[in-house]
Amino acid sequence: MISRRALLKGVGATMLASIAGGTQLAPQIANAQVSSASSDILGISRFNVGDIQITAIKDASSSIDPTIFGTEDQTDGIQAALTTANLPTDQLLNTFNIMMVQTGDDIFLIDTGLGGALVSTMEVLGVSPSDVTGIIGTHWHPDHVGGLSSDGAANFPNAMYYLSQTEYDFVQANIDAFTGDAAAAIAPYADNDQLSLYNSEDEIVAGIQAVAAPGHTPGHHAILMTSGGDQMLHLVDSVISAFVHVPNPTFSIQFDADPQLATETRVALLSRAADEQIPVIGYHFPFPGVGVIARNDDTFRFIAYS
């Protein structure tokens, strides 16, 4: 066990690194066991994009079967990518990284994860759910909306929930098919006039812009954060794996609604990040999921900040 004071001391350690594009990262990382009876490991990484303070929070982690990537004839490429990264070829760590974004007096979350360690981690940092003023929803999948609500009540009672118009319309039109849980998670916000719908390329709130990234879902969006001359691009689920997808951006994933469109989106976002030297966040990358994309011959590689 580690005390709250010791944890916060770790989070507050100063270690600045200059990165591409001029942004200053402060990868102040701390890990602690949530309780003596819990095997969940709490993870926090804090850094700045200009005047925007971002805290990466590990909501949960799990193992996934690497065969969800690609098609049957791409199996050798998947195995080769994992071997090159010195990783097991039969399983892949899948992390759920939530970004808590503080701009002035406002606190925003980018998605809410599965409803895992997000709230308990926030409380360690002295932030309660009622302090959250907004939640930026990127798409409807359960691992992104799972922490929104419980038993029909909003888990973040004072937060405006922002979701793309396209995604909201899709959820409402397909409730009987498969979006029922997502619709139920969103409903308390809609019912209390706490739902705001955005369009592609809108500035959702000051410094946070929606970037069209369709394919994974119809209204899936990446998120671009800008402050002064600094930027950071949240890839969300356009790029699932730092080890498989980044070097093999044409590999699809079983969860993509439109694999061809998702591939086009993935290549476009990785190209933009590499060519414009914009640091990135990966929702499912190894915690905290922050680094840069570099071109590697005719493909890409992810360089994590440590």
Image (tube, helix red, strand yellow):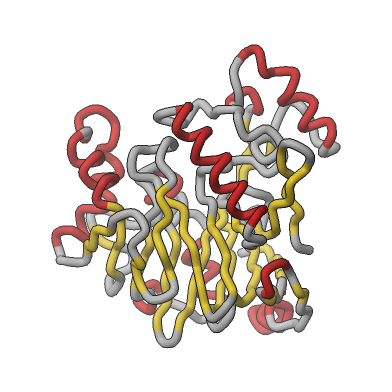
| 165 vs 90, nearest the viewer | 165
Residue 186 image position (x, y, % from top left):
26, 53
Q: Residue at x 37, y 47 (%)?
A: 139
Can residue 56 be seen? yes
Q: Quadrant of residue 34?
A: bottom right
Q: Residue at x 30, y 61 (%)?
A: 162
Residue 102 image position (x, y, % from top left):
48, 78
Q: Is residue 256 above or below residue 206?
A: above
Q: How many marks?
A: 0
Q: Quadrant of residue 163?
A: bottom left
For the N terminus, the quadrant is bottom right
Residue 106 image position (x, y, % from top left):
40, 81
In this view, which residue lies farthest toward the top? 73
| 202 vs 156, nearest the viewer | 202
Q: Quadrant of residue 281?
A: bottom right
Can residue 36 be seen? no
For the C terminus, the quadrant is bottom right
In this view, which residue lies farthest toward the bottom? 105
Q: Is residue 40 left or right of residue 210?
A: right
Q: Residue at x 67, y 69 (%)?
A: 21
Q: Is residue 275 left or right of residue 154?
A: right
Q: Is residue 30 above or below residue 76?
A: below
Q: Is residue 289 above or below residue 105?
A: above
Q: Residue at x 64, y 49 (%)?
A: 285
Residue 38 image position (x, y, % from top left):
62, 56
